[in-house]
Image: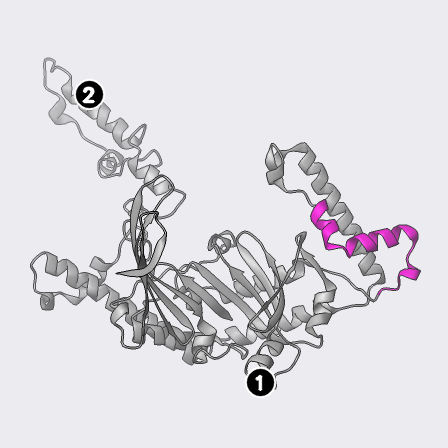
Amino acid sequence: MKDGFKILNLKAEDILNNPLLKFNSLKLSDKDETGEPTGEPTGEIIKQTAIYNSLIFTHRNETVKLKNGKKIHIINTKLSGSLHKYFNSGLHNYNDFFISNLLSVIIDLWEKFRINPLTNEMNNLEFGVNIITPYSYDEIKRSIINHKGKPYREFDIDGAKGIEFKHSDYIIKIYAKGIQYNRELNLNLPVNLIRYEIKVIRMEFFKRKGIRLNFLSDCLTTDLNALGDILLSTWSEILFTDTSINTRQLKQHEKLIYANGNNPNYWQNLKPLAINFLNGNKDTTYKQQRKKYYRELNKFKSLLTKYSTATIQQDISKLITEKWKELIFIDSETEDKITNFINSISVKKRDKITDLKYSEKGHNNNSCIVSVCPILSIKTCKYCGKDISQTRKNRVFCDNNNKCKNDYNNPLLNPKNNFKRMYEKRMQEPPGLFNTNEYIILTEYQKQLQSKHNSIYNKT
């Protein structure tokens, strides 16, 4: 399930004074005449950090000098860590983490720190599965060549042996979870307990996939099957080989294909990057080299289909599917809890906004009519009326490729203004023998145009 996450601009009430958090302060050091730090603190606190059940709260209050010489003052609180570890009191994340457990964590963050899942936007998110495989970590690693032409990088963090493929928007990680915690906590976990996860470092990744995952609450309400599909499709994109193939049975040209195919550097050098060509992905040379890359890749895959008996990739795909379905299963009780929790914090948010509006106008908060509160709290697109309550505070139009914004602000060549100009021109004409203006009768369509927004798209 979902694990690591990051919120760069945490919205929570009075987080610095929360009794559960003990902040360690980093004070600004004084500098001598040459600009070098003297080691003596100035007394000005620029950074405060607190850890609670593996979650890290970092509060910054400092002035930063930009490259253009301008200075900006930064005051914000960042939250990062593992939701899975938080559920286990910050100790580990080797066990299964179900959707019901995730709900418990999000509710706990709301109750203890007033971290509202409807308003706190995520900047990073990890999701994946812990599976017990019939293969050791070393067997799996030996069978992997690359992902989309990119070779893996080995890492060893906190005793976890693993490999990762780093892309611009996301990182694929495969590591031996059993080995990590057997060393760290002296547990007797299965040695073949493998963690496979995707760490999304730019949330644009989800947007391209058509998945709504912006706020913490989306982790409970979005289509979790879609995330499972991403795990599976990404796993199938990894290029596997079979090192047990007897090369003696291969023909001479097949030996070359097999040798090149097992070499990660061969694929990395063969695959072209559009950024290296003058006309990008439209460049003729780029297209030719790309065709050559996939031609060689298909030759290698055909050779494996012909001679390989290994089923590591297929076997683990089944385990990923089964485990993900198990983790995201929602029974009726959990579903009701999710609905009730989201509704309860929505009401609190609505009441707070309503009270603020009434207090600004000098009204008594207790006199607020209940039926009016939802209307006051919902923020809608200025043009189409779509609910945009969960978007940023200063947004007035919905995110529809700027269509609503352009439609609303474009006063040219639209039916309303065309009719308006025609009507005003008619009314300004000098009267003839009889004044006929008083006898002008507007059609229903013309009457509707008078109440329309300015837009070239308005049609009746």
SS type, badge 2 = helix
**Percent x, y of residue 434:** 10, 17
Q: Residues within 10 Å of mark 2 (few under 14, many from 20)?
A: few
Q: Where is 411 relative to 170, above or below?
A: above
Instruction: Answer with left or right where residue 276 lies relative to residue 170.
Output: right
- Prevailing secondary structure of the magenta residues: helix
Instruction: Answer with left or right where residue 240 lies relative to residue 397.
Output: right
Mark-to-mark CA distance, 1 and 2: 88 Å
Residue type, label 2? Lys
SS type, badge 1 = loop
**Percent x, y of residue 456:** 34, 33
261 within the magenta span: yes
Disc 2 target residue: 425
Instruction: Answer with left or right where residue 138 lies relative to residue 208.
Output: right
Compare residues 3 and 60 and report the one nearer the observer.
60
* Numbered circles on residues, count: 2
On the question of residue 45 being in view, the answer is no
Image point (68%, 57%), residue name: 146
What's the magenta region? 245-270
